[in-house]
Image: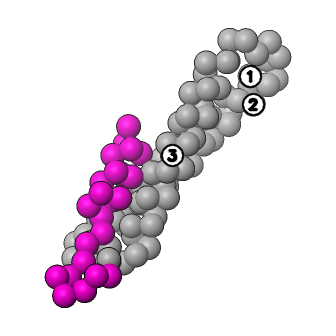
Amino acid sequence: VFALIVFSCLVGEGYTNLPSSPQLFCIFNHNEDACRYGIGIGVLAFLACIFFFMVDIYFPQISNTTDRKYLVLADLCFSGLWTFLWFVGFCFLTNQWSWT
């Protein structure tokens, strides 16, 4: 849900232009990396959620306990990594927003 919110906000209203120029720029301190980071994290998080949702659907049908263990560990590691990347993104976008 948060991935969709971040992605849609940045794509919908994250870029603007001056009345005298047709060139778009990021609203976060004119830093294109800030918008790209937020959009990239949002898209990748959404795709990963779809993947892990599909894994959860087929999880009861997996009979091999080793495969189940690796899927659970992959989910746990991905969640930890993605929590860190969301925190970095929050700090980065907040910093750029404060400079705007």
Residue type beneath disc 2: Tyr
Q: Nearer the viewer, residue 32 or 18?
A: 18
Label whose residue precedes the other's in the sequence (3 or 2): 3
The residue pinned by badge 1 equals 68
In the image, which residues are magenta? 1-23
Look at label 3 and name its amino acid.
Ala
In the rendered image, residue 8, in percent from the top left (x then y), is placed at: 34, 51
Label 3 sits on residue: 45
Residue 51 on image: x %, y %: 61, 34
Regarding mark 1 in the picture, which secondary structure is present there? helix
Give neighbour class at mark 1: few <14, some 14-19, many 20+ (Cα, 10 Å): some
Are the two marked residues, 1 and 2, in contact with CB atoms closer than 8 angstroms?
yes
- Which numbered disc flags the more N-terminal residue, 1 or 3? 3
Q: Is residue 54 left or right of residue 17?
A: right
| Residue linked to disc 2 | 70
Q: Residues under labels 3 and 2: Cα distance?
A: 20 Å
Q: Classify 10 Å Cα crowding around label 3: few (below 14), some (14-19), many (20 and above).
A: many
SS assignment at label 3: helix
Q: Is residue 70 magenta?
A: no
Q: In the structure shown, which secondary structural element does the residue marked by tag 2 occupy? A: helix
